[in-house]
Image (tube, helix red, strand yellow):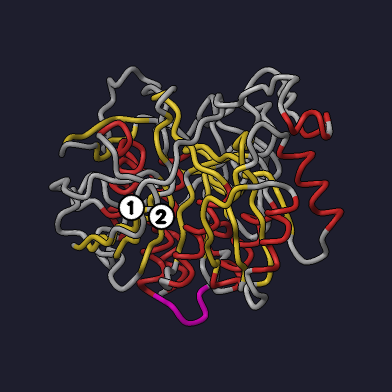
Amino acid sequence: MFTWLAGLPLFGLSAQAAEVAGPATPDCRIASSWCVQQPPGPPGYVPDELLLTYDSSRPASAAEGLIDRFRLREKRNDVLASVGTAMVTAAIGKRDPVALSQLINRSSDVVEAAPSKLFYAMDAAAPASGGRERGGYPLGLTGIEAVHRLTKGAGVKIGMIDTPIDISHFALQNAKVQRLELVHPGNAKNQQHGTEVAGILVSQNPRIGIAPEASLLAVSAFSVDVNNPDVRSSNAGLVARAIDLCIREGVDVLNLSFAGGQDKLVDRMIRKAVDSGIIVIAAAGNEGPAAAPAYPAATLGVKAVTAVDRAEQVFRDANQGDYIDLAAPGVDILTTAPRSSFNVTTGTSMAAAHVTGVVALLLSMRRQGFDQGILEKTATDLGEQGRDRAFGYGLVNAARAINTMK
């Protein structure tokens, strides 16, 4: 087990951090559309910054002129090497990111400006049964116990983009874990969600880890909002950088247990991952059956996973929709938690990690000619006959899937 710190604290992200500009600000005197006129509730993007992207083969001056012209302040400059794109994160003060990006895009054919969309880790819900049913059912429900007689995921590299993890947890210490940090590791609260997801993926505890012999690249891109400790958020720039790292590090399967709105840059990075042969798994969302589709789960090429309980009933707060592909255990799940503890937790994040682990098991058995639709073809049909909006193709059946590969 080893750690690589790849860039420490950047900035806190908060969906509640929007500031309303006063009428006397210089920007408002130039154009009223530049002032933030934020409706009530979370804005869906970082309120005071833009992302500027352009072909990385062009000189830096491609963006410098726009930065000067529109009085932006460069916060950082990155290259998304896997897609040949330079990305500038720019502070804009109290102007409206949407209106300002539209204005910049009308004035340039080289640089594309966009608001820095917010994404949220699919924070675990309270145990649906009040914690009375402590944990070990997931491995039996999907046939993992039988599959472990054949493989535990050796030789497969899992990528995970989440909060930092407690890499010192004793149940992870024998795992092959590499940690890349784009945000500060923070305290136990900051590490909660990522540690729970990592445990399901590769924990050495035989009741928890789906693919305990796989290696894990844990990229930290989400952090706790200091003003709202129950929210763990990131933005499009950080998520894009994290996906770029996973592509360049050669992961085989990528777990995305977070959600937000659709974002052009993040979609592009996911398409690149899929085109590179990476199997991408994402949480369906915990906003309820009537919620809008959650991204990146609804992005083309991503396997969207919902959560079920031990009775194979769908999690009451899971998103539903035509984009749902698979179901997996995600209610009252025993997993690792910071400070070498354990927790029982619920949410589509946990279900997505379960499926990611199953994919790792299957890949360890067969790389060449791997059928990426095998889980859908072998799933146990639930709900309405055939694919439906609640369960997708049904409950993952790892034992049936691996039997078809023998």
The reply to whether dot 2 and dot 1 touch (C-beta < 8 Å) is yes
Residue 98 position within the rendered picture, expressed as x and y whole percent measured from the top left: 75, 39
Q: Earlier in the sequence, mark 2 or mark 1?
A: 2
Q: Nearer the viewer, residue 227 or 266?
A: 227
| Magenta residues (range) | 366-370
Q: Which mark is residue 160?
A: 2
In the picture, which quadrant includes the C terminus? bottom left
* Residue occupying image coordinates x 17% and y 35%: 341
Side of 308 where 42 appears, left or right: right
Up-down relation of residue 34 to residue 113 (above or below) = above
* Residue occupying image coordinates x 70% and y 49%: 114
Say which quarter of the image contains residue 294: top right
Please tell me whether the stretch drawn in magenta is mainly helix, strand or loop. Answer: loop
Residue 394 position within the rendered picture, expressed as x and y whole percent measured from the top left: 56, 46
Q: In the rendered image, which residue does mark 1 sit on?
A: 201
Q: Which mark is residue 285?
A: none
Q: Nearer the viewer, residue 354 or 49?
A: 49
Residue 65 position within the rendered picture, expressed as x and y whole percent measured from the top left: 72, 61
Does dot 2 land on a helix, a strand or a loop? strand
- Amino acid identity at mark 2: Met
